[in-house]
Image (cartoon, rainbow, N blue to C red):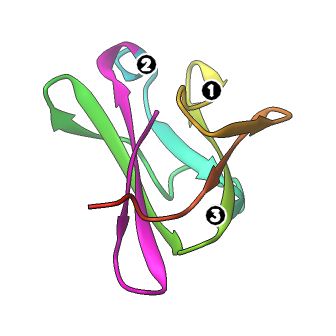
Amino acid sequence: MLHRIEPVNAQSCTVRFRLDRDHIGRAGTTSLVGDFNGWQPGHAPFVYRGFGGYQAAIVVPTGSTIRVRYLSERDGWGNPDNVVAVDGADSVIHVRPEPA
């Protein structure tokens, strides 16, 4: 699930995604994949951050539009739950910093 978008500087933003233990607990390694990394698993793995949640983060250009999914070793492909748009099988996110 899309968690938040934070500015890094004028040119880039960190986009954070969070999945709860139910999505990850039995799935083995789960990675955020998309056009930002050539759909390659392992570049943005979900890491345990406490309180039963796992997080993955990527840095992408501000104003870009990215296509994302998550991929687990055991459960296959999934989509973040609360994205702005879905195009085919992919979730689409327009990267703009959230207001402070």
Residue 65 x, y percent position in the rendering: 68, 62
Please name the predominant secondary structure of the magenta segment in the image.
strand
Q: Is residue 75 above or below residue 84?
A: above
Residue 54 x, y percent position in the rendering: 30, 35
Q: Quadrant of residue 76?
A: top right
Pick the front one: 74 or 19: 19
Pick the front one: 94 or 27: 94
Q: Badge 3, how many Cα within 10 Å: few under 14, some, many 20+?
A: some
Residue situated furthest front in the rendering: 99
| Residues at circles 1 and 2 in contact by the CB criterion of under 8 Å | yes
- Mark 2 lies on a secondary structure that is helix
Query: Of marks 3 and 1, which one's residue comes earlier in the chain?
Result: 3
Residue 53 is left or right of residue 92, and the answer is left
Query: Which residue is tagged 2?
Result: 23
Query: Which residue is tagged 1?
Result: 78
Write the start and end of the magenta stretch as one range.
1-22
Residue at 33% of width from left, 22% of height from top? 20
Residue at 42% of width from left, 64% of height from top? 97
Q: Amino acid at mark 2?
A: His
Q: Amino acid at mark 3?
A: Asn
- Mark 1 lies on a secondary structure that is strand
Q: Amino acid at mark 1?
A: Gly
Query: Which residue is tagged 3?
Result: 37
